Image (spheres, rainbow, N blue to C red):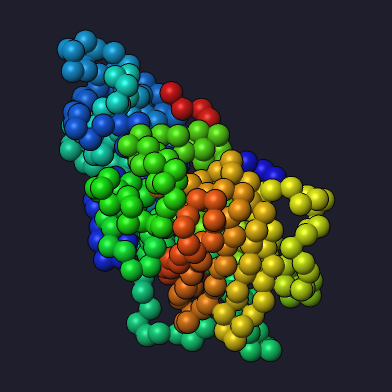
Amino acid sequence: MAFMKRTLPIVGAAAALFAAAASAHHAIGAKFDDTKPGTLNGIVTLVDWRNPHVHVFLNAKGPDGAVQNWAVELASAVELERSGWRPDSVKPGDALAVDGIFARDGTRQLWGESVKIAASGRKILYTADLKPVAPDARRPAPRWPDGVPILGANDSTDGYWGFPTATSLVQQGASVAVDANGVLANIADAKKVAPFQPWALALYENRQRRHLQDDPLFTDCRPPGGPRQFQSALGVQFVEDRERQRIFVLMGSGDRNYRIIYLDGRQQVGQVGGDDDNPLFYGRSVGKWEGDTLVVDTIGFNEAFWFSNGGLPHTSLLHLTERFSRPDFDTLHYEVTIDDPGAYTKPWTSSWDLRWVGGEELPTFFCQDNRP
């Protein structure tokens, strides 16, 4: 299996931290310190236009007064290109003024919160609001001839599901403020997030205190297994193979990964691909329609990935029950029940919506370990 490498309210609460850069890569706070703001004024020497983050290198005077080469880190190439920018939007020799925050480890790196052309003050290389415009009126969900809702695109248009209304798992009914990456505004709220066993709560708090810097999706290009695949603004696409009774879930969040949901009534053993019941990043999924809701049962996960933004632990006992419904043309409702007796004291549920992005193909994002 291939490996890969918005601040939103969760149950009515929100925290504003690095909202624009969270869709497919590491939490900015893992690398940069928001208590160390600063400004660089310098000349561009190199533009490195690659995922997971674009870098612009400057010869600039740092806090110590010496002119040295600095790496200014920005959003992903996917986000910047979709916002109208290109690799030649800034060139070697350009003079820039950059406001941002410095790296935690003291290296010559700055997260670029604002990048401007020095001479004119024109702002460049920022991410635009890419959410689709809401339709004037609610449109009914499309359906197959047998009446079952179409979860993907129909024959006349492309599209995918993106821009989730929540980007981390919090148990239903809890009021917890988190940022777009799943970082808690208050570490004391950790115990509210889920019904943790003591060891799982301790591990979750440790990951939070380390600003998610150990996230294997970023450090090792691990896949976004579990609900995490539905927490990325880069979205997912459903390809429904009705003849063979299966659905491919394609992921915009890295390396063209996909999972398969089988609807042919097979048991949770011996799936196609010869896994022989070995634990997997995406588990083994079988589903069935219950009215207008697709209910998917998934087991067989390994423990080598984070199954949600924010670093919630899981074990190989993880069992997910996912429910997909399309209440109208532009909305996909996702609900997941987590049952992992290895990490939690009882099953718990979380849910959110995704928006339909019509007329577009799923973004392509590749994890690349090429960062300075």
Q: Nearer the viewer, residue 342 or 300?
A: 342
Q: Position of residue 36 (x, y in %)?
A: 20, 29
Taking the spot 64% from the left edge, 89% from the top edge, the residue there is 147
Q: Position of residue 58 (x, y in %)?
A: 31, 22
Nearest the viewer among 201 and 123 is: 201
Using the image, determine if residue 294 lies above or below residue 273.
below
**Residue 192 image-quadrant placement:** bottom left
Percent from the top left, x then y, of residue 290?
61, 83
Is residue 176 left or right of 224 when viewed as pictured? left
Query: What's the residue at 35%, 34% (across, down)?
Result: 210
Quarter of image, res 61: top left
Residue under the point 67% across and 76% down: 288
Q: For the N terminus, which image quadrant?
A: top right
Looking at the picture, how far across and down is residue 240, in whole percent?
68, 71
Q: Is 12 left or right of 1, judged from the image as shown? A: left
Q: Nearer the viewer, residue 363 or 121?
A: 363
Q: What residue is shown at x 30% (from left), y 48% (from top)?
A: 184
Q: Which quarter of the rendered picture does the C terminus lie within?
A: top left
Residue 104 position by quadrant? top left
Please tell me whether residue 102 is drawn above or below residue 203 in the rendered image: above
